[in-house]
Amino acid sequence: MAALLGRVRSDLELGRRLAVLRAGTLALAVAGDPVARLFQAPWRYDPYETYDAVRERGPLVWSRSGTWVSSDFATSAAVLRDRRFGVRLASGQQPFDVTGGPVDAQAETNTLDLSLLGLDPPDHTRLRRLATPALSARRVEAMRPTVEATTARLLDGLDLRRATDLMDAFASPLPIAVISDVMAIPVEEQHRFAAWGRTLGASLDGVSSVRHLHRLLRAQADLQALFDRLLAERRRDPGEDLLSRLVAVDDRETTAEEVVSLAQLLLLAGFETTTNLIGNALRALFAHPDQLDAVRRDPAGLAPGLVAETLRYDPPVQLTGRVAHEPVELAGHRVRRDQVVLVLIGAAGRDPARHPRPADFDVSRADAESLAFSGGAHYCVGAPLARLEGEVALSSLLERWPDLRAAGRPVPRSTTVIRGLQRLSVRA
Ligand code: HEM
């Protein structure tokens, strides 16, 4: 009874804190603060307008929400690659608490365990080495036949004579099947992944409600239980999969918790983002009929350009953050130790100083360089796999249904860090 009362009280307190936070964000957004606008409807649905407005104020601006914001390509790339920036505060803690509370000794319970994404060297370097070999460009190229077969199997199951939600029927199950295959996770476990991914992905924006926090904690506990079990199985009976390789390393080098949280990150990062790469590419094609026509005529030839241009034009991960580990002179400002720079990945891809006609979606662009996979120490481990999946998925889809078209308006997700679609109704 006392425990239940305690929980009700802490839920009420959290609900109050979130309401205050929401009111504060709304007030800042109305006053024009760019960071608040990125996290607040209606502005969050079109961040590119806010990005342009921030960039016009300068490459690095101070937000009243308490962070620096970088929006041009050169400054953003420099921050990501600069070793004087990391992801933890001098105290060793993460700079953000998902519930919007102060970062103090207890706050660690309210931060996400992001594995590599939340670690600085030397822990980051040590753990990252475990994951990279299995996802190298060479290994990934060897996965092509499996990715093609999985794609064909999913496409075989579609009947596009009637309107179909492609996010649910294709863009989401494909990357889940591929990363599950890499980890040898049985098919019967996979039905819960999409919902976990959405809950955990949304929490990168901070939790939105008490219900969201409970869903998040449940998803984390379920995921933890799944990997505790799978990793124990692999220790007893190892195979050739990525999980077996993770448990095969010397356990004096890593703790069991580190391996579990790395496995969770690889699973979630492995599908949440790639799903949105496929959805965002199709959304952009439907909005640009000339580009859709061009890709229809040569799906395989233009697929790499389509993927690169989508990553520049409308990337699935829109922003990340770095903490200054020492004072840094940057774009004419002094960033103090422990201050955070929000790096607007989506804005960097639209910087007119880096790309001519940045707001045009052009799959034949000679140079579509972006920061969609970040840069420096945290550069995406799964970039080669994501590119392969995006290329195979989009080219196979348009080869099979050259007259694929939208059947209704795409429904966007309401998240900021992860940008993608909730629903994309199509027919052919
Ligand atoms: C289009 C798809 C993808 C996008 C846009 C994407 C984007 C990103 C970004 C922006 C980061 C770095 C964030 C930061 O600097 O703070 C990152 C890191 C990471 N990604 Fe991806 N990712 C994608 C697919 C994948 C896939 C398929 C996997 C795994 C199979 C993966 C695994 C990881 C891991 C493990 C990290 C952490 C790296 C580190 O912190 O050292 N990602 N990704």
Image (cartoon, rainbow, N blue to C red):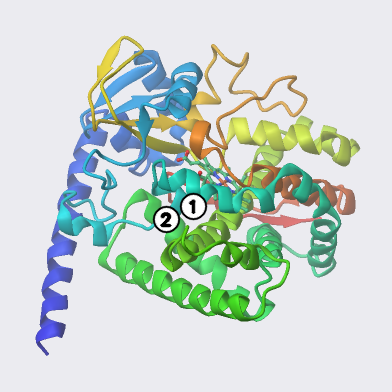
**Place of residue 205 in the rendered image (x, y in percent of width and height, measured from the top left):** 36, 49
The tag earlier along the polypeptide, 2 or 1, is 2
Q: Residue furthest bottom?
A: 1
On the image, the x and y values in percent for residue 156 come to 85, 67
| Residue at point 40%, 28% (across, down) | 50
Check if mark 2's residue and mark 1's residue have beta carbons within 8 Å.
Answer: yes
Which secondary structure lies at badge 2? helix
Q: On the image, numbered disc 2 is attached to which residue?
A: 202
The answer to whether residue 175 is above or below residue 227 is above
- As displayed, is residue 323 above or below residue 160? above
Going 27% across and 25% down the picture, which residue do you hit?
326
Q: Which amino acid does the dot numbered 1 rest on? A: Arg
Q: Image check: 166 left or right of 304?
A: left
Residue 58 vertical position relative to residue 93 in the rendered view, above or below: above
Tell me which corner region of the image, top left, top right, bottom left or bottom right, holds residue 331.
top left
Residue 232 pos. (x, y %): 54, 78
Q: Residues within 10 Å of mark 2 (few under 14, many from 20)?
A: many
Which residue is label 1 attached to?
A: 413
Task: Using the rendered image of the protein, determine whether residue 422 is visible from the camera's viewpoint.
Answer: no
Please state which of the two labelled residues, at mark 2 or mark 1, is closer to the viewer.
Answer: 2
Q: Is residue 275 or residue 399 the one in the foreground?
A: 275
- Residue at image x 37%, y 21%? 54
Q: Of the numbered discs in the image, which one, if any, rests on residue 326? A: none
Helix, strand or loop status at disc 1 = loop
Residue 116 is at least partly visible in this image: yes
Q: Amino acid at mark 2?
A: Ala
Nearest the viewer among 283 and 305 is: 305
The quadrant in which residue 138 appears is top right
Q: Quadrant of the N terminus?
A: bottom left
Is residue 333 found left or right of 145 in the rendered image?
left
